[in-house]
Image (tube, rainbow, N blue to C red):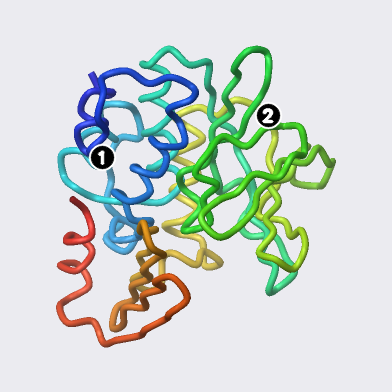
């Protein structure tokens, strides 16, 4: 059973999950698994089904990208009895003003009491840490507000928007079409092989912490704690440092 192993991994007390438990669960998950690309750089092959992700993330103590973290959570929530499906999106690069590689983001659509919510545990450190309703209501993340907005674009029917204090910006567009394991595999292939992928060129890891976030490159670690930012040389090899980020 993946639910029990997952809850033990993230240090979550309790054996069951209710809708009201999801914010606490999402925080625990964010503080456990780094968003990291070791498997991309190594072009590691593993199954993106329940057993493959359980082995890769829970037993081998790795983090991952969206197609690892959100499907893992999807299988946990499905086993817990939630009505969930995976949905596909395309990230918007606000600095460049362009869309990233088409269809290379995956998130979770959850239905509860006839209402729809977006859940995302795999969007770097830009995590809502709670279900985001489809009502266009803003919800608070760690330091960013989030909302889902129904808006037709060339990349989907809805947007996840972020507000860092300077107004709404697009995080990604997505559709409500259900994503299959084969789509996840194709998504990973694009991240591994596409020249436009930002994840297949250099080592990168990031993780939220209870007091901020940490960002790791192949030679530096940048820590954001409360209002203070510090950047230091990486004291050990990247692989070893990222391993130590995972409980």
Going 81% across and 37% down the picture, which residue do you hit?
A: 150
| Label 1 secondary element | helix
Q: Is residue 159 above or below residue 7?
A: below
Sooner in the amino-acid sequence: mark 2 or mark 1: 1
Q: Is residue 67 left or right of residue 157?
A: left
Judging depth in this view, the residue of 103 and 127 nearest the camera is 127
- Give the x, y percent position of residue 168: 76, 58
On residue 10, the disc is 1
On residue 176, the disc is 2
Q: Is residue 78 left or right of residue 235?
A: right
Residue closest to the far front = 226
When asked about the image quadrant of residue 71, the answer is top left
| Label 2 secondary element | strand
Q: Is residue 213 above or below residue 137?
A: below
- Give the x, y percent position of residue 124: 47, 57
Label 2 Cα neighbours within 10 Å, binned few <14 / some 14-19 / many ≥20: some
Residue closest to the far right = 152
Tell me the quarter of the image containing the N terminus: top left
């Amino acid at each position: 059973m993946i639910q029990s192993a997952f809850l033990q991994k993230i240090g979550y007390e309790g054996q069951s999950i209710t809708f009201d438990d999801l914010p606490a669960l999402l925080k625990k998950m964010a503080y456990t698994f780094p968003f990291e690309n070791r498997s991309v750089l190594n072009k590691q092959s593993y199954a993106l089904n329940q057993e493959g992700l359980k082995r890769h993330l829970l037993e081998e103590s790795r983090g991952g990208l969206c197609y690892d973290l959100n499907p893992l959570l999807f299988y946990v929530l499905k086993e817990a009895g939630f009505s969930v499906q995976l949905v596909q999106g395309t990230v918007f690069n606000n600095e460049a003003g362009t869309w990233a590689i088409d269809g290379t983001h995956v998130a979770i659509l959850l239905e509860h009491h006839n209402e729809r919510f977006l859940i995302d545990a795999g969007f770097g450190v830009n995590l809502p840490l709670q279900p985001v309703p489809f009502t266009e209501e803003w919800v608070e993340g760690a330091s960013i507000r989030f909302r889902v907005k129904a808006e037709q674009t060339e990349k989907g029917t809805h947007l996840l928007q972020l507000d860092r204090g300077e107004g709404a910006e697009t995080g990604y567009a997505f559709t409500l079409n259900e994503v299959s394991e084969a789509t996840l595999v194709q998504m990973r292939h694009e991240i591994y092989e596409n020249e436009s992928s930002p994840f297949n060129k250099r080592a990168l890891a990031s993780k939220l912490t209870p007091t901020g976030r940490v960002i790791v490159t192949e030679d530096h670690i940048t820590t954001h704690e409360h209002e203070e930012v510090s950047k230091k040389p990486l004291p050990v090899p990247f692989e070893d440092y990222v391993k130590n980020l995972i409980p």
